[in-house]
Amino acid sequence: MLTRLEVHGFKNLLDLSIDFGPFTCIAGENGTGKSNVFDAIQFLSLLADKPMIEAAQEVRGVQGERHSDPRDLFWKRSVRGRHRLFFAAEMIVPDRVEDDFGRIAQPTTTFLRYELEIGYQEPSGLDRFGRLTLLREDLRHISKATAKQHLRFPHSAGRFRDAVISGYRSGAPYISTDVDVEGGDTVVKVHQDGGRRGQPRPVVASRAPATVVSTITSSDDPTLFAARYEMRSWRRLALEPSALRSADGFLDPAVMGVDGSHLPAALYRVSHSGYSGDPDQVYARIAGRLSDLAGVKIRDLGVDQDEVRQLLTVRVREEDGTSIPARSLSEGTLRFLALCVLLEDPTMGGMICMEEPENGIHPANLVPMVELVRDLAVDPALAPAADNPFRQVLINTHSPGVVQLVSPEDLLFADTAVHRLEDGSTARALRLRPLRGTWRVGEGQRDYVTKADILPFLTNPPGAQTTLDLGAA
């Protein structure tokens, strides 16, 4: 779980700090930079898995593209030679993770703060885009004694906090950054985990093509491995109709992709895994959710197995008994179905980021859609379990209808504000503000919005037609 994010110098994010709860909705007009928050989270997730330059090329772009300029990630008014990206992420990591060799990694502490600073080196020779450089990387624990101050969202101390925050460590960080006095190089050091004695492992930062966290691939460093596992689980859903409509082969992956691919295989696995009852119960719950949508009359559904072609397809049966493939459903209904499958899958943890989940949904169906995305997130009043997966959800929207349906505690309002730069000039950067009286507003804090401030956002624009005059029809 990502509990806090700090970003500086990334796109239009300057000195931005966000406290996250299990469910967060960022609302605001188009063009404010709401999606840049998603980009920042995606970039951190990619950095935990790939070289820095590859991660940069995949942020809101085509996977594998090799023609983007990494400078596009930096604040557009960065001074030449002084490009800097700073990230800090406070996160709760799993207390048990399996590596590629089947070995179990158990971190010594599960509440961590990760800091990362990245620079840019100008291109030379045949290089046209330059390279990203690692300037600083740190990973430290957050003690159980101070966890309450860091977890500001409402939660149960006994059921939730004590269940997800465990372990003890004193003093030394897991990763630190120093300057080599003799050579002048910046050196990132990996310290022994679990209180074991020994010399830290040094890495010369200027020569590193990737972050240190991304190089941890085994349980030998269990806390670092758990941090990497957590960051890799921050996914950005972009459900595509073509992917959602595709059938699966018997040997295809049984985990749904971020584009909605492998939906049939994922549904079959979830329904037959015993996580949430027998297959008929799983199918019935999903059919019930689908029937909450106005205009959708589903009696039941299931996964059809074609033994001849070795294909899996999702089929639904309508109220009149007609059986049709799920690919015949509308795009909005298919996206809703995909989220229902995620809801039934307790193995899908981490953070799910979704942009404008109301797209393709009739206004009459906003209530079931908002309820669904909210139900995807863990309930912090209870301990995480198979029926309460440790899952986090972040959405953004410009829909007044969604804002009216989301709890005020879960809302952040996006706009831009004047930011004073180091040279004394000013520029506009993204600002996120909570509603007054909610948990994100600390004592003495005045950077919030009131109901009066957001009233124009919830009001029909001047001249809008709120009723239909049928007299002349």
Image (cartoon, rainbow, N blue to C red):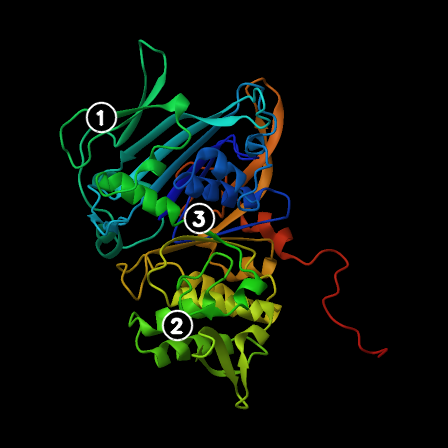
Marking on residue 200 = 1
Disc 1 crowd rating (10 Å Cα; few below 14, some 14-19, many 20+) is some
Residue drawn at 61 percent across, 42 percent down: 32
Residue drawn at 55 percent across, 30 percent down: 74
Location of mark 2 (residue) = 268
Does 2 appear above or below 296? above
What amino acid is labelled 2 in the image? Tyr
Q: In the orientation shown, which residue stands out farthest toward the top?
A: 182
Task: State the image quarter where residue 144 is shown.
Answer: top left
Residue drawn at 21 percent across, 50 percent down: 104
Instruction: Inspect this view and state whether residue 148 appears.
Output: no
Marking on residue 437 = 3
The location of residue 336, given as percent across then percent down, is 51, 68
The location of residue 44, given as percent across then percent down, is 43, 40
Going from the N terminus, do you reach mark 2 or mark 1 first?
A: 1
The location of residue 457, given as percent across then percent down, is 62, 52
Does 453 appear above or below 445? below
The quarter of the picture where the C terminus appears is bottom right
